[in-house]
Amino acid sequence: MMFSRRRLRKTGSRDGRPWSKLWERAWSWMRSRSSFVWLALSVLFLLLLLAGVGRGSDDGSAQPGRIIVLTQKRSESLRRLLNSLQEARYGNSRVELDIHIDAIKGGGGEPDSVDSEVRSVAEDAFWPYGKKTLIFEESNVGLEESWINAWDAKNARGDEVAVILEDDLEVSKDFFTWFKLAHYHH
């Protein structure tokens, strides 16, 4: 929408200044299209930050990453998450995948055990970006303990970064790019 200075002077504004009417109209236009404006600003922000992607460590190598997946008994959710992780873009980063499978509580005196479908999905998952590690709990530790013990930043290799995901999530193809940018600029 175009505004001319002459038209604003003729119509005036609440406080008598011609440019305040322009500001009122521009603000009203932005509010009516707020989601588009925020999307455009977000894309611009990401484009400005892209120079930081892949800088890696000081020796020029790509920054290593680790994805930690917590799961227990949702095999289809785990399959969706692993498919979305396989389709994501990792650039030249080596990304290790750790899948922590918590045991299901045994009922009626039965011992705790790992769900066989979840185990099968985890074992069959293809991971070309680095090492894949499966961690099976012998007894049920629960979600809180799974989170607490999933990754120890003090014992991580060099400048490794990690993200912990539960099995009921799906990720964007660009999630790792965003994650590295957020970590780099933190």
Image (cartoon, rainbow, N blue to C red):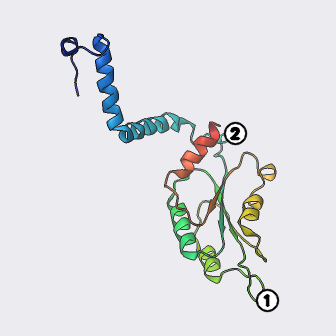
> In what quadrant of the picture does the C terminus appear?
top right
Is 67 placed above or below 24 here? below
User: How would you rate the neighbour count of disc 1 (Cα within 10 Å): few for under 14, some for 14-19, many for 20 or more?
Assistant: few
**Label 1 residue SS:** loop
Query: Could you say which disc has been placed on residue 72 in the image?
Result: none
Hey, what amino acid is under mark 2?
Answer: Asp
Q: Toward which corner of the image does residue 67 lie, by quadrant?
A: bottom right
Which residue, given by chain and number where applicable, does mark 2 sit on?
A: 59
**Label 2 residue SS:** loop
User: Residue placed at 49% from the left, 39% from the top?
Assistant: 46
- Marks 2 and 1 close (CB-CB < 8 Å): no
Closer-to-camera residue (76/178): 76
Closer-to-camera residue (153/106): 106
Spot occupied by residue 92 in the image (x, y as percentages of width and height): 58, 50
User: Residue placed at 38% from the left, 41% from the top?
Assistant: 35
Q: Is residue 114 visible?
A: yes
Specify the farthest residue to the front.
14
Q: Which is in the foreground here, disc 2 or disc 1? A: 1
Closer-to-camera residue (73/32): 32
Which residue, given by chain and number where applicable, does mark 1 sit on?
A: 109
Spot occupied by residue 138 in the image (x, y as percentages of width and height): 78, 77
Label whose residue precedes the other's in the sequence (2 or 1)? 2
Rounded to the nearest angstrom, the CA distance separating label 2 from label 1 is: 55 Å
Hey, what amino acid is under mark 1?
Answer: Gly
User: Residue placed at 58% from the left, 63% from the top?
Assistant: 128
Spot occupied by residue 85 in the image (x, y as percentages of width and height): 55, 61
> In what quadrant of the picture does the N terminus appear?
top left
